[in-house]
Amino acid sequence: MVTLVGTQTEFLDAVKDLIELDYDAAEAYDAAINRLENNDYKEKLRQFKEDHDRHTRELTNLVQKHGEEAPDGPSGKQWLTKGKVVLADLMGDKAILMAMRSNEIDTNTAYDRLLDHEGMWDDAREIIKKGFEDEKHHKAWFDEILGH
């Protein structure tokens, strides 16, 4: 079978990648929360982590509804997202938040691309749109805190 650009098969692969990215993000949030000194920042990051956990559940349910298997954990890229936070720990809270902002830029990009995918399933649009709104909110918070 030949798969063309914009097919539903490619959309499925992109959703699976997004699930892994959300798992990666949740692990990075755990790493950040464990390293931050500021309790207000920790609480905000806990809320953002809950969003990523919800995204993985919603996207997993969507994939399974279409009769496919979904990833059940982070990708190999988790070491990149989590690694930024671990290294930033050496420089304090601001560096950790900058690392997390960088990760949020990646998730924003992934959600944005998926929203424009030609092969999107009809029942996926609202889930992805809501996830993207969460991601934009996360990035906006980091931008405000970091003065970007």
Image (cartoon, rainbow, N blue to C red):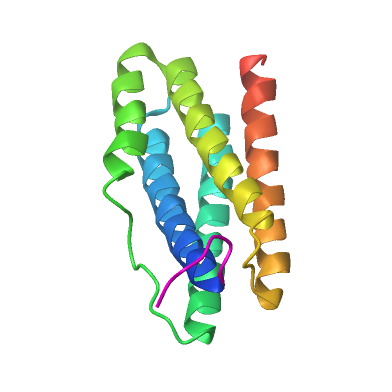
- Quarter residue 43 falls in: top right
- The image shows residue 68, relative to residue 11, as above or below, that is below
Displayed quadrant of residue 78: top left
Where 101 sits versus 114, above or below?
above
**Picture residue at 33% right of the left edge, 61% below the top:** 73
Q: Main secondary structure of the magenta part?
A: loop
Q: Position of residue 105 (x, y in %)?
A: 56, 34
Asked whether residue 104 appears in the rendered view, the answer is yes
Q: Is residue 86 left or right of residue 2?
A: left
- Image height of 90 relative to 62, above or below: above
Magenta region: which residues? 1-7
Can residue 39 be seen here? The reply is no
In this rendered view, identify the residue nearer to me: 48 or 59: 59
> Is residue 127 magenta-colored?
no
Residue at point 40% right, 72% down? 70
Farthest front residue in view: 2
Q: Residue at x 53, y 29 (%)?
A: 101
Q: Is residue 4 magenta?
A: yes
Q: Is residue 68 left or right of residue 146?
A: left
Which x, y percent locates residue 51? 58, 54
Q: Who's the residue at 66% across and 16% down the image?
A: 148
Q: Position of residue 17 (x, y in %)?
A: 43, 57
How far across and how far down the image is residue 14, in percent? 49, 59
Closer to us: 66 or 10? 10
